[in-house]
Image (cartoon, grey):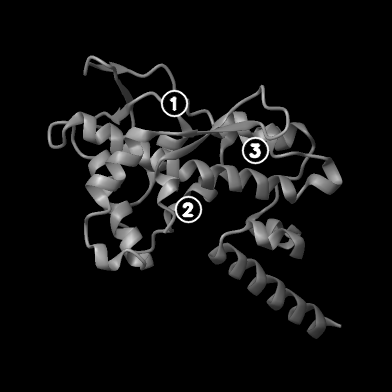
């Protein structure tokens, strides 16, 4: 497990012409994650299930009713998860752009403003509806948020108790590729809004290393089955 993912956030930075984003480290998020969470079940730290259990716990704190969890802890739990999914969102943009870069010269930087819009510092909690984003200011007062951070949308919509849920990484990937503004951006540039199966067919071998292991396995299986089917049709 890479604990730094829970305290380092990727934020859209239009001034960075080379990468299009900046990386911000949060000491408070790091302290919260290390002191509050890493002490739980220390012997199981290396297992994938341990990290999923930790994510479930942090999500339950972040998405809890405001009266059941102290608001500062709720906001810090959310910040840790915002940091975590920001790298998944960035990777999704890079993967999506790589599918079209040769034919359409699309770069991932053109997609970042839609989904890496988290400022990386505002303390956010969720309202009782589990969706509305509220700001916890420095005085401890809860105010209505002025906008919607996509990282929060990813976390709020994640089906925590679903038996067939995706991993948090893959959920962030799916939400990013299905973002309405990203779809609109692709359409405006004349890029085909293909079906999921068609998009799988566009992924080249050189793109596989950019995917998460589960996604890589899916694409490899698709290409194998597709190749076999083509041979049988000849």
Indicate whether 170 appears above or below 224.
above
Q: Nearer the viewer, mark 1 or mark 2?
A: 2
Query: Which residue is nearer to you in this view: 89 or 223?
Result: 89
Instruction: Label 3: state its secondary structure.
Output: helix
Write down the residue under mark 1. Answer: 148
Numbered mark located on residue 78 in the image? none
Determine whether, in the image, residue 204 is placed left or right of residue 121: right
Determine whether, in the image, residue 33 is placed left or right of residue 26: left
Q: Residues within 10 Å of mark 2 (few under 14, many from 20)?
A: some
* Label 1, label 2: how far apart the Cα atoms are: 20 Å
Write down the residue under mark 2. Answer: 169
Q: Nearer the viewer, mark 1 or mark 3?
A: 1
**Residue 128 visible to the viewer:** no
Percent x, y of residue 96: 67, 47
Q: Residues within 10 Å of mark 1 (few under 14, many from 20)?
A: some
Q: Are marks 2 and 3 in contact (CB under 8 Å)?
A: no
Q: Nearer the viewer, mark 2 or mark 3?
A: 2
Instruction: Label 2: state its secondary structure.
Output: helix
Residue at left offset 78%, top offset 47%: 100
Residue at left offset 34%, top offset 59%: 52
Q: Earlier in the sequence, mark 1 or mark 3?
A: 1
Percent x, y of residue 166: 43, 58
The mark total stands at: 3
Write down the residue under mark 3. Answer: 183
Quadrant of the frame with the C terminus: bottom right
Q: Are marks 1 and 3 in contact (CB under 8 Å)?
A: no
Instruction: Label 1: state its secondary structure.
Output: loop
Query: Which residue is nearer to you in this view: 15 or 128?
Result: 15
Q: Earlier in the sequence, mark 1 or mark 2?
A: 1
Residue at left offset 38%, top offset 63%: 164
């Amino acid at each position: 497990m890479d604990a730094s993912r829970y305290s380092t956030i990727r934020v859209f930075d239009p001034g960075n012409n080379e990468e299009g984003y900046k990386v911000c480290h949060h000491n408070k998020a790091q302290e919260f994650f290390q002191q509050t969470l890493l002490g739980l079940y220390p012997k199981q730290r290396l297992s994938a299930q341990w990290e999923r259990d930790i994510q479930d716990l942090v999500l339950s704190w972040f998405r809890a009713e405001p009266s059941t969890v102290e608001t500062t802890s709720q906001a810090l739990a959310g910040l840790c998860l915002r940091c975590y999914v920001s790298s998944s969102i960035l990777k999704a943009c890079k993967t999506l752009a790589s599918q079209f870069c040769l034919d359409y010269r699309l770069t991932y930087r053109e997609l970042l403003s839609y989904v890496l819009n988290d400022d990386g510092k505002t303390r956010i909690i969720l309202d009782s509806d589990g969706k509305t984003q509220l700001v916890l200011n420095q005085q401890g007062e809860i105010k209505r948020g002025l906008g919607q951070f996509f990282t929060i949308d990813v976390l709020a919509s994640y089906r925590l108790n679903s038996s067939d849920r995706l991993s948090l990484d893959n959920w962030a990937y799916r939400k990013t590729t299905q973002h309405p503004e990203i779809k609109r951006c692709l359409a405006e540039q004349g890029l085909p809004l293909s079906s999921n199966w068609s998009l799988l067919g566009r992924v080249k071998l050189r793109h596989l290393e950019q995917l998460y292991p589960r996604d890589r396995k899916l694409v490899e299986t698709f290409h194998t089955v597709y190749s076999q089917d083509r041979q049988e049709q000849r």
